Amino acid sequence: MFECFIYSLSAVAPILFMILLGNILSRKMLSRSFFDQCDKLVFRVALPVYIFSKLVSADISQLPEMSAIIFCMAAIFTTFLLVSIGAYFLLPLEKRGAFIHGTFRANFSIIGFVLAETMLDESGATAIACATPFIIIISNVLATTTLTINMPREKRMSFGKLVLNIVKNISTNPLILSILVALPFMIFGIKLPEIATDSLNYLKNIATPLALLSLGAVSPSEEKTRIMPEAVVATVIKLIVMPATFISIAYLLGLRGNSIALVMVLGTSPTAVTSYIMSKSMHSHAELARQIVLFTTVCCSFTIFVFAFILRYLQVI
C-alpha cells in the first residue's frame, strides 16, 4: 500500500509543482504574451521533436497494441456521443459546443509524456507518442464538427468548408507531421548520428517543463464572473466519470501495462487549452470553455493520483 502511495505521488508531484509554479510566475513575474509564445514553441517545435526522437529511437517491439489505441478512440467518440445527446436536451444552443468539446478534448500529449517519464518506462513514452496522432485526428474531427453544428445558425459554415477545415487542421498539425517524418526511420531502422541526437535532446528536454508552466498560466478571468454549474458538471464528467468508466472497461477487457496506462492518461488529462481557443473563434460560449479548462487543470493532479494508485494497487501498471 505504501509503495502504491509513493508511486502515485511521484507521478503527480512534478505535474502539480510545475503547474503551480507556472501560475505563480504568470501572476508575479511573466506576462501572458510570454506564455503565448511558450505555447507556440512547445506545439510547433519542442513536442514534435520529442515525439520524433522517441519514435526514431524506439524498438518496433515496444510499439503499443493497436487494440489499446482503438479503445482510446472509441472512448473519445462514446463520450462525445453521449454528452452530445444530453447537451441537446439540457443546454441552450450557445453553450452546447463548449460543453461537449470540454468533456472529450484531452491534453493528452503533454500530460501523457510527463506521466510516461514519471510512471512508465521507455516503452511507455513510445506508446504515448504512437497514440498521439490517432487521438489528435479524432479529437480535431469531433471538435470542429460539434462547434460547427452548435454555432448560431447564421454563422454556420457549409459542409464543404467544414471538411476542408478538418483536413487543414490535421494535415498541418506539427505533431502528426513529426510522426510522418519519423516513420521511415522506424521502418528501415535508420539511426541518427550522435551529433543530431544530442542536438534534438536539448530541444526535447524543454517540451514538458515549458508545457506544464504554460498550463499553469491558465488564469481566472479579469472580470468577476460566477462559477458556471455547467463547467463543474463538465469537469466531473471529464475527470471522474470518463476515466472511471473506461478504465474499468479496459480492465475487464484485459488491457494491462502500457495499454491501460494509455486509457488512464486519456481519462485523467485536463481539457486542452485549444478547447477555449476554438470555442472563442467559432462563436461558442468562451467563458464556459475557459472555466472547464481552468477547473480540469486545477483538479487533474488529484484524479491522476487516485487512478494511478488504484491501478498500481491492482498491479496492472
Image: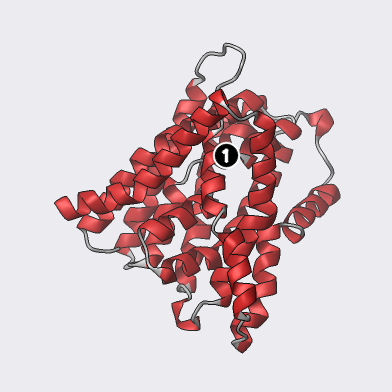
Q: Is residue 21 above or below residue 171?
A: above
Residue at 39%, 46% (x, y): give it: 14
**Considering the numbered disc 1 on the image, is that residue within a helix, a strand or a loop?**
helix
Quarter of the C terminus within the rendering: bottom left
Residue 143 quadrant: top right
Q: Is residue 215 above or below residue 201?
A: above
Q: Nearer the viewer, residue 131 or 43?
A: 43
Q: Work out which residue is located at the far bottom of the displayed protein and give it.
A: 188
| Residue at 71 percent of width and 31 percent of height | 280
The single residue placed furthest to the top in the displayed view is 224
Q: Tell me the residue that label 1 is attached to.
A: 214
The answer to whether residue 111 of the structure is visible from this angle is yes
Amino acid type for the residue under numbered disc 1:
Ser
Pick the residue in front: 223 or 54.
54
**Side of 217 relative to 172 (left or right):** left
Residue 134 seen anywhere in this rendered image of the structure: no
Residue extending furthest front?
A: 195
The percent coordinates of residue 2 (x first, y second) are: 15, 51
Q: Which percent across, then down, holds residue 52? A: 61, 68
Q: Which residue is at the front of the view, 309 or 76? A: 309
Q: Position of residue 87 (x, y in %)?
A: 56, 32
Tell me what residue is drawn at x 62 percent, y 27 percent. 95
- Mark 1, Cα crowd under 10 Å, few <14 / some 14-19 / many 20+, is many
Q: Nearer the viewer, residue 191 or 307?
A: 191
Instruction: Report which quarter residue 153 is drawn in.
Output: top right
